[in-house]
Image: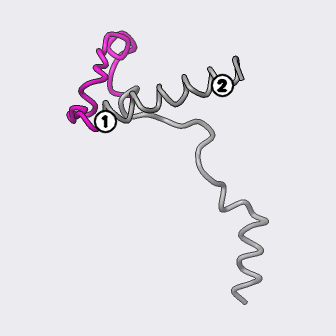
Amino acid sequence: ADYYQLGFNLRSNIFQGGPLESRSLMKDSYTPDVIQKAVRDPKNWHGRRTDDLGRWHQKNALNLNLQKAFEEKYG
């Protein structure tokens, strides 16, 4: 009985799914000029400051990419 009821509900399009366009609370709350003027500080990420270990990982990733580019270009 439950199987047939589920099939009927699926055919009736009761389960329509989520909205086609996503909505953002920040975009709904503020005007576009406020969002464009927002200053993004890469050293202060959501109130958390990047530490020495984070900076080391960033430099290490750049170094690895540089080494890979050199190997591809010069062999």
In the rendered image, the vertical position of residue 30 relative to residue 10, given as above or below:
above
Q: Is residue 7 left or right of residue 47?
A: right
Q: Which quadrant is home to the N terminus?
A: bottom right
So how many labels did they put on this image? 2
The location of residue 19, given as percent across then percent down, is: 59, 44
Amino acid at the residue labelled 2: Glu
Tag 1's secondary structure? helix
* Image disc number at residue 54: 1
In the image, 30: left or right of 51?
right
Q: Is residue 73 above or below residue 56?
A: above
Residue appearing at x 33%, y 21% in the figure: 30
Q: Residue at x 43, y 34 (%)?
A: 24
Residue 38 picture location, percent across and down:
30, 15
- Residue depicted at 24% across the width and 33% down the height: 52
Alpha-carbon neighbours of circle 1 within 10 Å: few (<14), some, or many (≥20)?
few
Mark 2 = which residue? 71
What is the C-alpha distance between the residues marked 1 and 2?
26 Å
Percent from the top left, x then y, of residue 67? 56, 26
Which amino acid is tagged 1? Gly
Determine whether, in the image, residue 25 is placed left or right of residue 69. left
Q: Secondary structure at mark 2?
A: helix
Residue range corresponding to the magenta coloring: 28-53
Per the image, is 47 magenta? yes
Mark closer to the chain start, 1 or 2:
1
Q: Which of the 4 image quadrants contains residue 29?
A: top left
- Residue 56 image position (x, y, % from top left): 33, 33
Say which quarter of the image contains residue 59: top left
